């Protein structure tokens, strides 16, 4: 038991389950099947639902842009599209506003690179100095001295940065509005610093999709950006875009995708890949190799993990987290009785899209056709009333029969319980021990959703 308590990462390996908070991600990363294609010198869009691993893939692609000696192979630019950026006249709602933001971030990333890696600048020809200095002076927004203040002392290239931002602004070398030409000349100059090109990583758009009133305008702006073909014609100035899967259909006919300027990928995981992720994460926590099924003695443990997790890596790890915590504390597998208690610590994620009929239970996607019409009506009604004990007569008449004004207390017990049984088989990780659908004898049914 001592070796367990001296584990490598302990429960922190199952902490926030956010790639941004895991400096040790490379130790347990499992690449998707198409990872090598994503890492090529081309623009891509990766679609995936929350928890599918988009951020982990992004971080590991960024890690690929580092040479064996630790120096960067590409200039990495991170862009989170922001409708509120800068002044409204050139904000996110316009393609020029979006390009202005990207070029600003490119200038900032260049200054950070030169501050830490000045050797390429020293070896570069004079025209490279001139072009990159013009780019910084033209596109870096705000007060350059303030923006670069933390780079102006104590770093190997602090003097290079100081010279660039303090040099007197000369004549325009390129038309700033000719984005294709600017990107071409910028990437060409960046190559003379010893880099292979520019990778612009685009992520974090979920922040702006919570308010339905703003989604339409946001999607319209993003669609127009992805349809501006001159922005995406160079492999040495590539975009690596990560978007929620809900945007796949609205953006599928954007010209950049439709005309193959972007290679689209939809994240999917096989069960063997998900098991490999689980094994690596367990080993990271315990400091030793152990198959996940050895964490618990319950005979249906791994089946419950599979049914809860579906194709979603985060949900798989959420299910494993309480049993890993138990093993770390007690040094032995959880018993069946302990598992029944521990599994109630797993967030009960459930969503029902009333437009498409798609149900997501944990990490499993349940298509509309997997449920009978009556069972689906019951689920929709329970979902609208989640957390409330819905009386059986109300559930039957307003949910099953859709009689919104009925005051009759009659319900067909056989039909109602048959449809509820169908729902349990569809959404419950273990239909014999339900968590989502809680029945109160002769009172009603409550849908439990905790996340």
Image (spheres, rainbow, N blue to C red):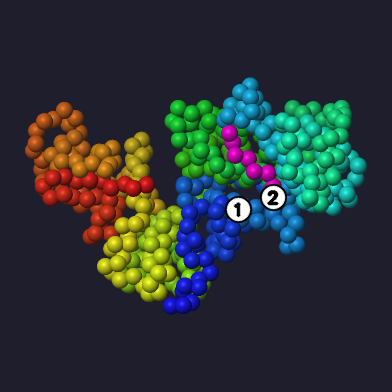
> Where does residue 83 sit, x and y in percent of width and height?
57, 30
Give the farthest residue toward the right. 126
Query: Is residue 80 located in the magenta-colored stretch of the structure?
Result: yes
> In the rendered image, is residue 14 in sight?
yes
Q: Which residues are magenta?
A: 76-82
Q: Is residue 154 above or below residue 411?
A: below
> Where does residue 350 sit, x and y in percent of width and height?
34, 47
**Residue sitting nearer the eye, 224 or 159:** 159
Q: Is residue 219 above or below residue 363?
A: above
Q: CA distance from mark 2 to mark 1?
A: 16 Å
> Where does residue 298 sit, x and y in percent of width and height?
30, 69
**Residue sitting nearer the eye, 10 or 83:** 10
Q: Which mark is residue 41?
A: 2
Q: Which mark is residue 59?
A: 1
Q: Is residue 300 left or right of residue 35?
A: left
**Residue sitting nearer the eye, 323 or 101:** 323
Give the farthest residue toward the front. 154
Give the farthest residue toward the top. 89
Q: Is residue 314 above or below residue 46?
A: below
At 33% from the left and 37% from the top, the residue drawn is 354
Q: Is residue 426 left or right of residue 56?
A: left
Query: Is residue 23 located in the magenta-colored stretch of the structure?
Result: no
Label 2 CA crowd tier, 10 Å (few <14, some 14–19, many 20+): some
Position of the N terminus by quadrant: bottom left
At 34% from the left and 48% from the top, the residue drawn is 450
- Of badges 2 and 1, the one in the foreground is 1
At 76% from the left and 34% from the top, the residue drawn is 144
Q: Is residue 366 left or right of residue 166?
A: left
**Residue sitting nearer the eye, 343 or 38:** 343
**Tag 1 or tag 2, which sits nearer the N-term?**
2
């Amino acid at each position: 038991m001592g070796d367990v308590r001296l584990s490598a990462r302990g429960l922190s390996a199952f902490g926030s389950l956010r790639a941004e908070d895991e400096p040790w991600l490379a130790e347990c990363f499992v690449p998707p099947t198409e990872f090598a294609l994503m890492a090529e010198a081309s623009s891509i869009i990766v679609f995936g639902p929350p928890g599918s691993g988009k951020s982990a893939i992004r971080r590991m692609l960024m890690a690929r842009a580092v040479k064996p000696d630790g120096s960067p192979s590409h200039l990495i630019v991170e862009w989170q599209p922001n409708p509120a950026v800068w002044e409204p006249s050139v904000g996110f709602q316009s393609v020029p506003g979006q390009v202005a933001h990207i070029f600003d971030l490119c200038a900032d990333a260049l200054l950070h690179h030169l501050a830490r890696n000045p050797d390429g600048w020293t070896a570069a020809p004079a025209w490279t100095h001139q072009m990159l200095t013009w780019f910084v002076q033209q596109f870096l927004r705000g007060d350059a001295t303030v923006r670069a203040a933390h780079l102006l002392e104590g770093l190997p290239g602090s003097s290079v940065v100081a010279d660039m931002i303090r040099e007197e602004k000369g004549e325009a070398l390129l038309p700033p509005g000719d984005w294709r030409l600017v990107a071409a000349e910028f990437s060409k100059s960046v190559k003379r610093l010893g880099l292979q090109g520019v990778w612009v990583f685009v992520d974090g758009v979920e922040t702006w999709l919570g308010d339905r009133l703003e989604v339409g305008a946001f999607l319209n702006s993003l669609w127009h950006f992805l349809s501006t073909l001159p922005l995406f014609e160079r492999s040495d100035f590539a975009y690596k875009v990560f978007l929620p899967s809900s945007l796949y259909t609205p953006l599928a006919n954007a010209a950049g995708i439709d005309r193959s300027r972007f290679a689209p990928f939809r994240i999917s995981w096989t069960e063997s890949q998900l098991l490999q992720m689980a094994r690596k994460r367990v080993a990271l926590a315990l400091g030793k190799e152990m198959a996940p099924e050895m964490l618990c003695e319950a005979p249906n443990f791994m089946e419950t993990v599979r049914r809860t997790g579906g194709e979603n890596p985060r949900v798989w790890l959420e299910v494993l987290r309480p049993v890993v915590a138990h093993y770390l504390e007690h040094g032995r597998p959880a018993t069946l009785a302990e598992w029944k208690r521990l599994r109630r610590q797993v967030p009960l994620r459930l969503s029902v899209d009333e437009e498409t009929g798609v149900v997501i239970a944990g990490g499993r996607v349940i298509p509309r056709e997997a449920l009978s019409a009556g069972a689906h009506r019951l689920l929709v009604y329970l979902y609208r009333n989640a957390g409330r004990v819905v009386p059986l007569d109300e559930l039957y008449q307003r949910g099953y029969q859709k009689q919104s004004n009925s005051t009759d207390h009659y319900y067909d017990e056989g039909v109602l319980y048959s449809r509820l049984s169908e729902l349990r088989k569809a959404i419950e990780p273990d239909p014999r021990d339900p968590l989502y659908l809680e029945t109160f004898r002769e009172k009603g049914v409550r849908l439990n959703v905790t996340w």
